[in-house]
Image (cartoon, rainbow, N blue to C red):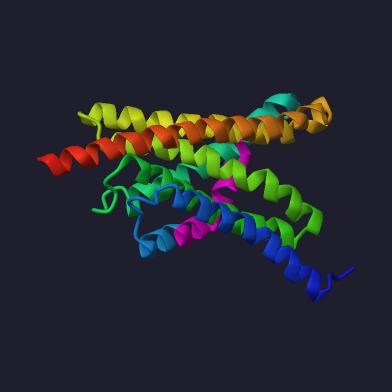
Amino acid sequence: MERSWPNLVISFLLAAAPALLLLRYYYRQDRERPEPKGLVVRIFLFGIVATFVAIPLELLMSVFQRLFTDFPLLTALFKAFVVAALVEEYLKLTIVRLFAYRNRNFDEIMDGVVYAVVASLGFACMENILYVLGGTIWTALTRAVTAIPLHATASGLMGYYVGRAKFAPSPQMERASINKGLRIAIFIHGTYDFLLFSVPVLGTLPVVGIIPLIIIAFLILRSRIRIALEEDGRRAQFDQLV
């Protein structure tokens, strides 16, 4: 049955609105020294483009799932942590490193959080639209409170460590900080996907863990944002003195 235009419009708005609202929320966290809106928009658009880059990459990685055909739980693990989380978080990290990291406006730890969240929300927005246009309004509502906040928190924590890497005293520590952020993002994102992908094997009980996972990740990110803003404030005061 074809969906009516009003339902399509409602689904589209429900798909895009959560990402845009979270974008506004995280952008305003850096209200003292906000990032240029033009650069933020570009990073968001690159995040959208990354969605279409992820599709063939994930299809390619999915070929290796055949190695675990006889082990459904291992298949779910591989699909969650490698096919989905690794590919998607690495693409978001690449966007930040290519288009923001060396930009002169990236001059605070908090900037890493902002740009990583923006890239993730561009990705999540388009991903959500693709899911919702092929699904229902219920799909839109469910993903609005799960998938989109998950993308933002996982990538936001990665961005915190990317921001710290910018001020690392050595190239080795810089790489270590970036890699740590990527691992954390993959762990959070992969855990979320595993809770979903394991349903055919373990039943619906694992799904109960999704909301606590998102809440805990959000609270950790909020604490990291507070630390980043405090350190950035001290650095700005020191720069004024010298």
In the picture, the quarter occupied by the N terminus is bottom right
Residue 230 on image: x %, y %: 34, 35
Look at the picture and state if 171 lies above or below 14: above
Please identify the residue farthest to the right as the structure is shown.
Answer: 1
Tell which of 132 and 80 is nearer to you: 132
Confirm whether the magenta stretch covers residue 38. Answer: no
Tell me the residue at 44%/32% (across/down). Answer: 224
Tell me the residue at 65%/55% (across/down). Answer: 128
Horizontal side, residue 12 vs residue 105: left or right: right
Residue 204 location, quadrant: top right
Residue 210 on image: x %, y %: 70, 33
Residue 147 visible, this angle: yes
Confirm whether the magenta stretch covers residue 52. Answer: yes
Residue 144 on image: x %, y %: 68, 50
Residue 135 location, quadrant: bottom right
Tell me the residue at 73%/35% (across/down). Answer: 196
Look at the picture and state if 48 lies above or below 152: below
Tell which of 85 and 55 is nearer to you: 85
Residue 53 visible, this angle: no
Residue 81 on image: x %, y %: 59, 32
Region rendered in magenta? 44-64
